[in-house]
Amino acid sequence: MEERRTETEESAWWRYWLALRLVRGVGNVTYRELLEQFATPQAVFAASASALTAAGIHAEVARAITTFDQWHAVDTELKKITRTGVRLVTRADQDYPVNLTHLHDPPPFLYLRGALVPEDRVAIAIVGSRFASAYGKGMARDLAHGLVERGVTIVSGLARGIDAEAHRAALAAGGRTLAVLGSGLDIIYPSEHRALAAEIPTQGAVLSEFALGSKPDAVHFPYRNRVISGLTLGTVVVEAAENSGSLITARFALEQNREVFAVPGPVTSMRSRGPHRLIKEGAKLVEGIDDIVNEIVPTGAPARSAPPAVPAVTLEPHETLLVGFFGSEPVHVDALIGKSGLGAARVLEVLLAMELKGIVTQLPGTHFALAHEWADNKRS
Amino acid sequence: MEERRTETEESAWWRYWLALRLVRGVGNVTYRELLEQFATPQAVFAASASALTAAGIHAEVARAITTFDQWHAVDTELKKITRTGVRLVTRADQDYPVNLTHLHDPPPFLYLRGALVPEDRVAIAIVGSRFASAYGKGMARDLAHGLVERGVTIVSGLARGIDAEAHRAALAAGGRTLAVLGSGLDIIYPSEHRALAAEIPTQGAVLSEFALGSKPDAVHFPYRNRVISGLTLGTVVVEAAENSGSLITARFALEQNREVFAVPGPVTSMRSRGPHRLIKEGAKLVEGIDDIVNEIVPTGAPARSAPPAVPAVTLEPHETLLVGFFGSEPVHVDALIGKSGLGAARVLEVLLAMELKGIVTQLPGTHFALAHEWADNKRS
């Protein structure tokens, strides 16, 4: 399915993806069910009404599919896509985000500027108030900076305040960042973030599930928030009023079995009400990036919220070297330094990267153990 | 045992309590065991060595008791006590704090200025850094003020910073407050708190388990902290460095099965490290007094930390009136307002007081139910 396509082939391919989304009665959940049964939108449109209902699709929806006649609207959208240089990333594409595939209602495709890379799986959302304080903005920057230094991709919503600080700090630190919009990719909101939106694709991506030309309607934002949390292993709420959009993102994170983190602040600040409420409800209190990284590193006994099935991981040469020194027993860091001859700082750096990739787990007393899957691989 | 004693009788009574404390090998735990077996220190001294060892007392300690000869030191201490106008509250006295009796190692007696009243059972400790910020001091004041308005006694350690703010706010709001010292009652530390220490007994008590003349040695403070938490239903840590005395108090509170509360603050403040650590370890995050009061109110299913056995509670006339309207079913607040003719505000006020006393429990939808013991009383 994933072969190099010519531009014309690509347009033909996208055409059916766009069309199926326009069918009355086909939301994200039905779209997912249709793909599970028929593999591609093209196959869906090729199916007979009886084949569709046999596959469990409601008769009315089956009829809407077989009688679909809005190809003109599809082609108009397709032309816009080509003209604006935007790309569609469909569920069938290899770079469709793995984390989103675990959602109940994954977007069947995303409009994208920039690129998604496999490392974006280790992503954290940093979200919060549009009216953040200097403290909140500083925390957003510090966390984004520290996380990208550990190879974590920062996801946020391109909003004023916390979102923008997180994106900017990730860019400034040379890291990756993804901005999820509640509008079409051709409508940047707020408009003063146009330069930021233009810079992000150089170190990440700006993406949206909304068609080009879609306005930043209030009703879009909960959907946008669900994608923000869904792209990540966890969401950090930095400052947020009670009952704000950031808390909705946190609630989605919980529903999606992802971690929720919250940065405390002075009780006297209204903006810390949201994070404090989340902490009371069980969110992890965040003082620094260690509080985040420690939770998202896969351990022997997976955390409540670890997303299932780690995809194939590529090893760096030094990582391959270190893996060679592990047996079934934990190994002390000094032994790894001695055997590898890499020097303490480099060994610790490599081990950290391996921890983030889920290859090793740190145990008390600076011992490290191979994660189960890797230990199994070595045994077999 | 608890009859009105003359001053001479009182001295004679205290003499044995002081003496038993001076016996080599008799700490708080052995003291408690001896009282459980022999009821009074006088009876302990009257017992033979074989009676003591038969009661499970180590032979060497039994010998130290039967050969005790430091009565001169006892009489010197007794004279000091009389001269300074301090009182001893022994375990055998009715005003010995009920909350302390649940400790593994309760002080056999306390040196006291002021008075302890039954209402002091509903006490909360407010502790924290000697070097508190304006934010921390403000929080200590607000919490102390709010809690005494709900009839809660504020316990603290008379230290600079958070402690002093909590005591002062409790006094200013007309509430009760207890100060526990790590020195003898005749040595006020820090000395600038002498006026505060002199005022507290007018609305509470200053107390210590250390003999008159004891210096505020560092080694005393963990013992002092254990009494602070032990006197209360829960301890609130407002601001505290990591590894500070306040965290020791919090740890004692946990060991004593009392609640631990912590006030969050900016992550950038070293003084909030302690509270944040406690929250990570499971302490309740406190934004205001409701977060405290909701935890210490006894409910149908008692919280992990509710101290056992609520002592006899005296009902105010309006409380007695309202109790009369309860049956085995929850009652809506409107019914209580209607039947009592007291007016909504007064009924809510009385219900709150009853909740704090553990007489009623609030249920969803502003229904109230009699707590089990009270319902049982009504039934029987």
Image (cartoon, coloured by chain):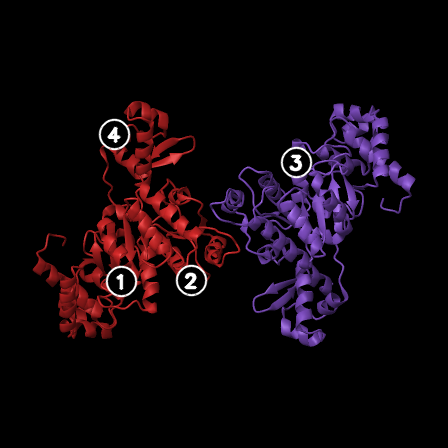
Chain colours: A red, B purple
Residue B211 lies in what quarter of the image?
A: top right
Count of marks placed on residues: 4
Pointer 3 indicates a residue of which chain? Answer: B
Q: Quadrant of the C terminus of chain B?
A: bottom right
State whether residue B148 is above or below residue B68. below
* Residue A282: image location, x then y, percent: 47, 52
The 10 Å Cα crowd at callout 1, few under 14, some 14 to 19, many 20 or more, is many
* Residue A253: image location, x then y, percent: 37, 55
Does residue B308 appear left or right of residue B260 in this picture? Answer: right
Q: Amino acid at mark 3?
A: Phe
Q: Depth-wise, is mark 1 or mark 4 nearer the camera?
A: 1
* Residue A97: image location, x then y, percent: 25, 53
In contact (CB < 8 Å): disc 3 and disc 1 = no
Q: Depth-wise, is mark 3 or mark 1 nearer the camera?
A: 1
Q: Nearer the viewer, residue A209 or A42?
A: A209
Q: Which mark is residue A244?
A: 2
CA separation, marks 3 and 1?
60 Å
Q: Helix, strand, or loop for circle 1?
A: loop
* Marked residue nearer the N-terminal end (1 or 2): 1
CA separation, marks 4 and 2?
48 Å
Q: Helix, strand, or loop for circle 2?
A: loop
Q: Which mark is residue B221?
A: 3
Tell if the residue under mark 1 belongs to the same chain as the one under mark 2: yes
Q: Which mark is residue A321?
A: 4
Question: For the point 88% across and 36% down, which residue is it?
Answer: B12
Query: Which residue is label 1 attached to?
Result: A188
CA separation, marks 1 and 4?
46 Å
Does residue A84 appear left or right of residue A350 in this picture? Answer: left
Q: Amino acid at mark 4?
A: Leu
Q: Amino acid at mark 2?
A: Ser
* Marked residue nearer the N-terminal end (1 or 4): 1
Pointer 2 indicates a residue of which chain? Answer: A
